Amino acid sequence: MCGIFAYLNYLEPKTRKEILELLIKGLQRLEYRGYDSAGVAFDRDETEIEIIRCKGKVQALSDAIWSHENVTDLERQYQVHVGIAHTRWATHGEPSELNSHPQRSDGENEFVVVHNGILTNYKDIKTFLENKGFTFESETDTEVIVKLIKHLHETHPKMKFRELVEQVSQQLEGAFAIVLKSKHFPGQCVATRRGSPLLVGIKTKTNLQTDHIPIIYSSKATKILKLCTKLSLNDDERDRDAIKMTGTHRNSIAEDNEDAHRANLLTSNSLVGGKLARSNSTTEFVPYEDEKVVEYLFASDASAIIEHTNRVIFLEDDDVASVEDGRLTIHRLKRNLTGDASPMTREIITLKMEIQQIMKGNFSSFMQKEIFEQPESVINTMRGRINFEDETVVLGGIKDFIPEIKRCRRLLLIGCGTSYHSIIATRQILEELTELPVMIELASDFLDRNTPIFRDDVCFFVSQSGETADTLMALRYCKHRGALIVGITNTVGSSICRESHCGVHINAGPEIGVASTKAYTSQVISLVMFALVMSEDRISMRPRRSEIIQGLHSLPEQIKQVLNLDEQVLEMSKELFQQKSLLLMGRGWNYSTVLEGALKIKELTYMHSEGILAGELKHGPLALIDQAMPVIMVVTRDSVYPKCMNALQQVMARGASPILIAEIDDLDTQKYSKKVLPIPHTVDCLQGILSVIPLQLLSYHIAVLRDCDVDCPRNLAKSVTVE
């Protein structure tokens, strides 16, 4: 982890200064993902590669680049050049310059690589290479990749760069996305992925010749793999500790054949998980007609590419993308092991993201901006899906699967962190409107238990990024057992999008801050809309559906009202920011609210906070209450109001003076505290959306007062792409 950015210009003249500025800007666009060090690799001259790395922020890397002794002749132009860059979040080895990426094969920088993910068999590969005489200078798992490529290149010097990467990628186990360059193959760039996101941006001055790039399946490549395996193990350097290289990886998951019904429903224009039709286009991408000028950008995230081009290809697991002489080809060593009909092309997709969406504007941080964007983001989530006049709801991404979902045995909703809290927030309304058993699961715990899954289960996987490693592993676990997979994500083209049978895009817009805010409210609304779709043909539920739909209609204006509490929340933050602990209590519809609020406070302020179910107060948490313990309670007029009032009185009896989040017109409740954050009244299942916003604001203001980095909390990453 955590961010990859690479740039290749072919016959598009760029100065060294322009290339370095572009690489630095690409890393700055990826800063929100979280990192602790950064680095770049670029051409020093025609034959040598320069690597500059440092611990700390991208700005520190920028300073190191411009002051480096080998960064001279900034106006020198390159007709063809490959530059790679990386922000690292330490997994193997402490944050340091030596452990930063790019990692190199040797002191001459013959091969250099940037890598996201974790290699689970790197120790075996490292032992193999050490027995071949290689020495290692870093503590990273990444270094084995380039050293293994160098070993293969030395024993098979006629192999192409792409073939070297193909063979080595087959020896790697775990999750990875890698981009490589080499002094032996100037002007070439090779990238591949498995379990970690990677996309390719294409920028040309003219129209594209094709919208699809066919995948090249090569039997020759498979034979090379077998030959290389044999040579690498049986040459004259063989020793007893050499690892056994295989063309498979332990964590590959063979999927069952999907039902014919599901296969027929998966079309190329499906919102989530659509299959691509075979194209008659050429076997490689070239710019239109005889125009050869082209620029390629490789990145972990579209936010690093969008200011340059909106035409991208999302690579699939085990794709190998190679650029040589300005031509992009995508290769695979093998077809799907199960024999399923798999896409024969990779589609060039036009992103709808705009550069303004990933800029702060007039706000001091991305998180603050995203909190205040929620009136618009919830509208975008509902736009085109809810007709408020005739009170109908249509979710295009799953409408063809609704009959199958209605026949299911149970619903399973699976997520991590904030996404898990959105599941808790909607469990009750899903049970009420679908009249189906609803299970909610933390993805990591779900995998630990080897939970029984059946073919008539429907499994929802909720993830803002669509790349959360535990959630993705749980998805594959359920898909392998024949369940229907529904993805709920905020990122078009993400792994969960592509691997789901159907799904809903929450349309919240890019979320840059590590702490999720607007994605949470949009996830809740998306799941509420699903519940409304499931109950549309039930006459007995029409009054309830109507109440919820009208509540959704009023929600954007009510969110604006809540955001007006910002100054009031700031004043309360000044009283709380020096505290060491904070308890939040709620019940019923607001249990998820206090869990999410406590998570935000932990993430941003590094203060201990705990969300407590008010019904559990007497079973332990009451022992924490005294005059010195700050408490926030969410008390709204719903079915559990009397029980919440009981908990409030118990807390006050122990000397605490809780801050209340209560409804504007509920004066009786407000009398119990001098510190009240009043919010509008709405239908019970939506009340949590309004009550969580003051807690988002509170966590933001406390973090600012404690001088914490709001957008990039320590030790955290936006996209958790490793287990």
Image (spheres, grey):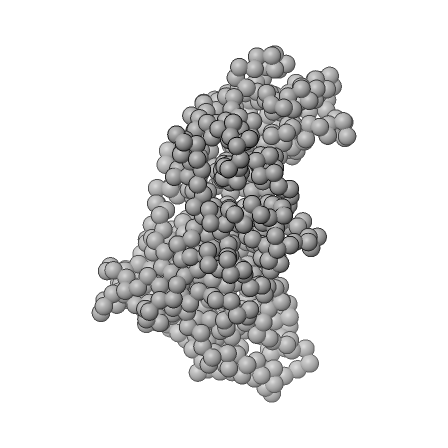
Q: Answer above or below: position of 388 versus 646.
A: below
Residue visible at 45% across and 23% down? 561
Left or right: residue 376 versus residue 693 is left
Q: Answer above or below: position of 567 versus 471.
A: above
Name the one closer to the observer, 679 or 54: 679
Name the one closer to the observer, 99 or 524: 524
Q: Residue furthest left?
A: 290
Name the one closer to the observer, 76 or 193: 193
Q: Answer above or below: position of 188 versus 538.
A: below
Residue visible at 58% across and 39% down? 434
User: Which image quadrant: the C terminus?
Assistant: bottom right
Is residue 155 visible in the rendered image? The answer is yes
Is residue 414 visible in the rendered image? The answer is no
Q: Residue furthest front?
A: 539
Please tell me how many numbered marks the rendered image carries. 0
Residue visible at 38% across and 60% down? 347
Left or right: residue 208 versus residue 48 is left
Name the one closer to the observer, 676 or 76: 676
Find residue 623 and report its horizontal and vertical position in percent: 76, 27
Find residue 527 and report its horizontal and vertical position in percent: 52, 39
Find residue 481 and report its horizontal and vertical position in percent: 62, 58
Residue visible at 57% across and 12% down? 667
Find residue 625 and report its horizontal and vertical position in percent: 72, 24
